[in-house]
Amino acid sequence: MTAGVLLALAAPVALACGPAPKAVIDIDANSYYTDKHRSVIDPVLKARNVAAVKPIDDFLDVLARAASAYQASPAARAGEADCALQWMARWAGDQALLGKMTTRQSYYTRKWTLGGLALSYAKLKPAATGLQQRSIEAWLTALAAATIVHSDAHKGVRNNHYYWEGLAVTAAGAVTGDARLLAWGRKVFGHAMSQVAADGSLPLEMNRAVKALHYHLFAVTPLVMMASILDLRSPQLDSLVRFTLDGAADPAYIEKQTGFVQERATGPMSWKAIYARQVPGPASATTATSWQPRLGGDISIANPLEHVAR
């Protein structure tokens, strides 16, 4: 994927659509943690993984940018939408991401990508031809089915990864109208809510040493979007959101409970914009960056799959 293609899709005036990058069929990602809590990162292994999944991340980022531009200004950005749909249809036809998964990290990459693909496609769908819809939606359904098969076969720790699987399948189900996928997503959401402790924490994320706060922030993200897509309200989710926001503001309680000084929250908390559309109030009034390709790009405007509180 060239810088020129990236610029073409990000430009205010749509340029000629370049060919889709070669589809990634197999995913050869790798883990990069070195301790039992999976909290210490080996920078060499991290860099290797970033390089391995870069073609997938770049593809998702371009689609998210085109989809977000089209959602914000459909008439002016129809060219980008058409190009993005051509790219998606090409990868769909090539059965991208449905090949060999070499490691658990490969499966993680696929589910994160599926969620972003489905949420970006929801923005692009009004511009899709009937043929494109059939091809892309069959591909998203196949990716969701593969995600379910892997998840159900590996019934180990049901932590943040399970929630991201839930979001990926939920988004795919919502944008394709597949009731089976939506039902599986509801099951995942219900399980997640059953894990929320009385203080609002997630015990499995509390067991991440210095990254307990980080992983609460990571875990709450797909759950907030799932709640919006499924149009669900949950006091457990509200409790988790309060716990996570309080921890980001002052991690003293988390540090006392875990016995580890926490890494401070430095990344984006874009999920707050989604939560604010469901539960307006002081706890969700402020947002950080609104850009997150795994959530469909720009989330300052509600995704078409979201249910916004009236």
Image (spheres, rainbow, N blue to C red):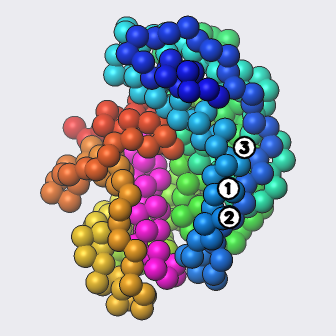
Disc 2 is placed on an element classified as helix
Q: Which residue is mark 1?
A: 49
Quadrant in the picture for residue 223: bottom left
Residue picked out by circle 3: 145
The residue at 68%/35% (across/down) is 141
**Disc 2 marks which residue?**
45
Percent position (x, y) of residue 53? 67, 47
Quadrant, the N terminus: top right
Which residue is nearer to you in this view: 5 or 237? 5
Return the mark for residue 197: none
On screen, 260 above or below 250? below
Give the distance between the C-alpha atoms of the residues marked 2 and 1, in whole angstroms.
6 Å
Asked if the magenta segment contains residue 220, the reply would be yes
Q: Looking at the picture, does residue 78 appear above or below residue 289?
A: above
- Magenta range is 207-230
Q: CA distance from mark 3 to mark 2?
A: 30 Å
Which quadrant is the C terminus positioned in? top left
Res 20 seen here: yes
